[in-house]
Image (cartoon, rainbow, N blue to C red):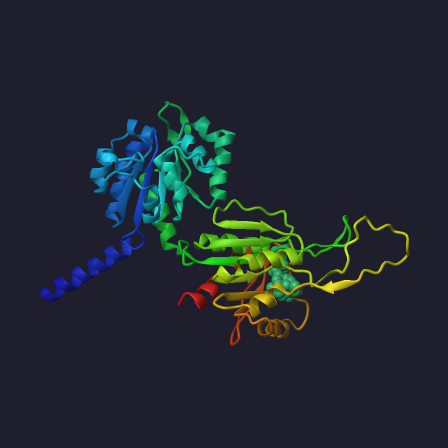
């Protein structure tokens, strides 16, 4: 009998474990702002705790008009902070709170707090904590339907998404004003599920937290005269996708890009814009020594005009000869100066692809090389997709045609496997 009881107990434990897998022992920081939906946070805290999470709550001053800090504190079994200073002159350290959290949830998030979040207007503990947070941030907006539909709110939500935060959209229904429409905060069950799904999906992998990754992107332009240059068709899409993915995984990213129209809003990406190969070289070696991983996805011009004409060259002659000289090999020099960095090169080939890529891997002292061929449809310059092979000294893996975002994931999965054992 005792044997069966033991088995049943073990099965029960296993089922409980499977049911709570994503949230068990996760540290959830809930930031409550001043909206009527603040009362629902009681249920949100309860649901997270039921699933094995640890919860702390912070509140904006106006949230105190809508809900009780005492209730949140009792339910979460943790003190609730709403100001930078506690009793007896103690400091409620927003940086510690932010670093403590595995996930931060701003719920309900008013139009006012949303605007402050995206514009960095730091006038309360919630915003200071949010700006210090390195963890994923979920935002559950709640407001009247017209406020929710207003272009400024839509734009702020888009900006929050561009910064890498997750929006849990407001739901349709009856609102505090008596009007009916979209604006109700998502139900606590929905918020818990969004966070749980995110944690279970493995997307939360922040395996590069504490690491610095340098990425080169885009083309280089080599001036002929003040008007003309030698360049190539690179758009920067591949390099920017790598930068976004590396930042998502927690890395500090130094992105050194040649002329590209692409932008990034990601606060973990430091974007340095350069024009020529020589400028890219200088910028790369300002940072290279301190980085953990370097990925050279830029299409660097191998040659530049020996002399740059000071004035626009006039078309007097039938033929014009421009003497070209070799540019510095940025990746090759990174290989020579490699100490502890994990070095990833790209090879853009049109023939004998694997042989050429392998030869670059060896000559440039790389740890791995990403091969893409202009012979593959959908691969290479400007496209939103790419098709790659990854080669190391002793192995090769081939991937199908995917979006450049998915290719960036494959490349960084590979780097993770090789560097984070
Ligand atoms: O920017 P997109 O439009 O998205 O296009 C992406 C891409 C096609 C540019 C990208 O996927 C790619 O293949 N980048 C490398 C292009 C290239 O210059 O390849 P390569 O085989 O000529 O150079 C080999 C490696 O040496 C590359 O890592 C390159 O960055 C590096 N290199 C080359 C010359 C030089 N002087 N310095 C370098 O660092």
- Residue ranking furthest to the left: 1
Displayed-image quarter of ligand 1: bottom right
User: Can the viewer see residue 48?
Assistant: no
- Residue ranking furthest to the bottom: 394
Please tell me which residue is depicted at 53% across the width and 60% down the height of the picture.
Answer: 288
Give the image location of residue 360, x and y in percent. 61, 71
Q: Quadrant of residue 357?
A: bottom right
Q: Is residue 33 left or right of residue 116?
A: left
- In this rendering, the count of numbered labels is 0
Up the image or down, 150 lies above or below 317; here it is above
Quarter holding the C terminus? bottom left
Quarter holding the N terminus? bottom left
Up the image or down, 230 lies above or below 92; here it is below
Please tell me which residue is depicted at 34% across the width and 50% down the height of the picture.
Answer: 102
Give the image location of residue 5, x and y in percent. 12, 62
Up the image or down, 71 lies above or below 309; here it is above
Give the image location of residue 220, x and y in percent. 67, 56
In the image, 60 versus 91, the foreground residue is 91
Q: Is residue 377 left or right of residue 225?
A: left
Q: Is residue 409 left or right of residue 123?
A: right
In the image, 113 versus 189, the foreground residue is 113
Please tell me which residue is depicted at 21% across the width and 42% down the height of the picture.
Answer: 77
Please tell me which residue is depicted at 50% across the width and 39% down the height of the picture.
Answer: 158
Give the image location of residue 19, x and y in percent. 28, 54
In the image, 401 versus 298, the foreground residue is 298
User: Can the viewer see residue 154?
Assistant: yes
């Amino acid at each position: 009998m005792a044997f069966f009881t033991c088995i049943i107990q073990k099965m029960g434990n296993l089922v409980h474990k499977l049911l709570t897998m994503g949230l068990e022992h996760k540290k959830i920081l809930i930031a409550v702002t001043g909206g009527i939906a603040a009362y629902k946070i009681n249920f949100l805290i309860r649901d997270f705790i039921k699933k094995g999470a640890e919860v702390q709550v912070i509140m904006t001053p106006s949230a105190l008009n809508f809900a009780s800090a005492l209730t949140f504190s009792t339910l979460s079994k943790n003190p609730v902070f709403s100001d930078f200073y506690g009793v007896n002159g103690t400091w409620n350290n927003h940086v510690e709170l932010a670093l403590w959290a595995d996930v931060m949830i701003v719920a309900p998030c008013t139009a006012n707090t949303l605007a402050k979040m995206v514009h960095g207007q730091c006038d309360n503990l919630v915003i200071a904590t949010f700006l210090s947070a390195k963890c994923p941030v979920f935002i559950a907006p709640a407001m009247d339907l017209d406020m929710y539909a207003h272009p400024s709110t839509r734009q702020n939500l888009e900006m929050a998404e561009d910064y890498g935060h997750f929006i849990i959209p407001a739901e349709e229904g009856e609102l505090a004003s008596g009007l009916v429409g979209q604006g109700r905060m998502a139900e606590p069950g929905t918020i818990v599920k969004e966070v749980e799904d995110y944690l279970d999906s493995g997307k939360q992998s922040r395996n590069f937290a504490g690491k610095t990754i340098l990425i080169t992107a885009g083309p280089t332009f080599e001036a002929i005269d003040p008007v003309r240059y030698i360049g190539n068709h690179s758009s920067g899409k591949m390099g920017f996708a790598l930068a976004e993915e590396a930042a998502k995984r927690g890395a500090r990213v130094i992105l050194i890009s040649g002329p590209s129209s692409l932008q990034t809003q990601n606060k973990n990406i430091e974007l340095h814009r350069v024009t020529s190969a020589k400028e890219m070289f200088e910028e790369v070696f300002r940072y290279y020594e301190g980085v953990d991983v370097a990925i050279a996805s830029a299409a660097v011009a191998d040659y530049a005009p020996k002399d740059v004409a000071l004035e626009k060259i006039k078309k007097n002659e039938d033929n014009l000869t421009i003497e070209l000289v070799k540019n510095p090999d940025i990746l090759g020099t990174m290989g020579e100066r490699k100490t502890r960095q994990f070095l990833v090169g790209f090879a853009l080939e049109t023939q004998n692809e694997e042989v050429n890529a392998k030869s670059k891997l060896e000559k440039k002292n790389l740890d791995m090389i990403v091969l893409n061929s202009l012979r593959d449809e959908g691969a290479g310059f400007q496209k939103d997709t790419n098709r790659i092979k990854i080669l190391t000294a002793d192995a090769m893996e081939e991937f199908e045609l995917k979006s450049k975002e998915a290719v960036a994931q494959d490349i960084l999965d590979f780097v993770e496997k090789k560097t984070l054992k």
